[in-house]
Image: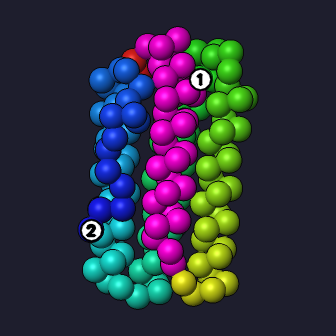
Amino acid sequence: MSLLHWEDRYSVGVAAVDHEHKELIGLINRLYEEATTRGSKEAAVDFFGDLFKAISSHFALEERLMRERGYDQLTQHKNDHERLLDELRDIMEDFEASDRFDEKILAQSLDAWFSRHFESDDARLHSVLGDH
Ligand SMILES: [Fe+2]
Ligand SMILES: [Fe+2]
């Protein structure tokens, strides 16, 4: 089962960037599927680690682009990335403390964040800097 689905409201209006975001969502779904197939606590822990890595490396690419091109809203954009990573850390810690994993909360938090961040910060970034 997929954790996330691509939604039109995620679109930043640049095909190449939408493609990267679709790939990120695809990767998240693959990791999630693998973890549910394995079905153990260890699998869930691995899933969180891999999810965190996939999202942070997407962010790192964007942040490098912004630094290289002297983007004016680098700090603000980076802070929003940090906010999602903090949220993910909280969800991971809750899981470790309670041993219960609520996939709905994770999916909702990613969906809310993706739609807001993609349509504001990422859309602005890519309209100012163009494709990368
Ligand atoms: Fe992005
Ligand atoms: Fe971003």
Q: Kindly tell me whether residue 61 is visible in this rendering.
A: no
Per the image, the residue denoted by label 2 is 1
Residue lying at 39% horizontally and 34% vertically, measured from the top left: 9
Tell me the kind of residue under disc 2.
Met
Q: How far apart are marks 1 and 2 (CA)?
A: 35 Å
For residue 1, what is the image quadrant? bottom left
Q: Label 2's element?
A: loop
- The residue type indicated by label 1 comes to Met
Vertical placement of residue 97 versus 79, above or below: below
Would residue 9 appear left or right of 109 to someone viewing this image? left
Which range of residues does the magenta coloring cover? 101-130
Overall secondary structure of the magenta stretch? helix
Point out residue 11 in the picture as x, y percentages from the top left corner.
38, 30
Q: Which label's residue is closer to the chain start, 1 or 2? A: 2
Secondary structure beneath disc 1?
helix
The residue nearer to you, when weighing 107 against 71, is: 107
Residue at figure coordinates x 32%, y 50% from the top left: 5
User: Which residue is labeled 1 in the image?
Assistant: 66
